[in-house]
Amino acid sequence: MPTDDAVETFLRKADEVLHEYERGYMDADAAMNAMELYVTELREEADAE
């Protein structure tokens, strides 16, 4: 299970991506690529424990 810090970091990064997408600063492909990266980071954190 990932740490609370890892989950908080993921949620913060996910919120930033969603806000940038909603404002039109990021296209859908870039948003999905960023989210995939953040999910991978969270999974790696969970696997490390």
Image (cartoon, helix red, strand yellow):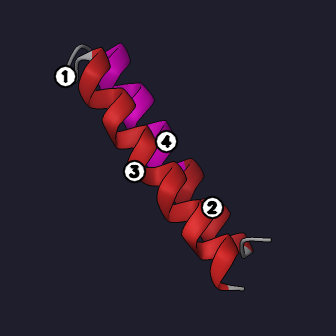
- Going 44% across and 42% down the picture, which residue do you hit? 36
Question: What is the C-alpha distance between the residues marked 2 and 4?
Answer: 10 Å
Question: What is the C-alpha distance between the residues marked 4 and 3?
Answer: 10 Å
Q: Which residues are magenta?
A: 12-23
Locate residue 5 relative to residue 1 in the image: left or right. Answer: left
Question: What is the C-alpha distance between the residues marked 1 and 4?
Answer: 14 Å
Disc 3 marks which residue?
Answer: 37
Disc 2 marks which residue?
Answer: 8
Q: Are marks 2 and 4 in contact (CB under 8 Å)?
A: no
Mark 1: amino acid: Tyr
- Residue 32 against residue 36 in the figure, above or below: above
Question: What is the C-alpha distance between the residues marked 3 and 2?
Answer: 15 Å
Q: Tell me the SS state at disc 4.
A: helix
Mark 3: amino acid: Leu
Q: Tell me the SS state at disc 1.
A: loop
Dot 4, crowdedness within 10 Å: few (<14), some or many (≥20)?
A: some
Q: Quadrant of the N terminus?
A: bottom right
Disc 1 marks which residue?
Answer: 25
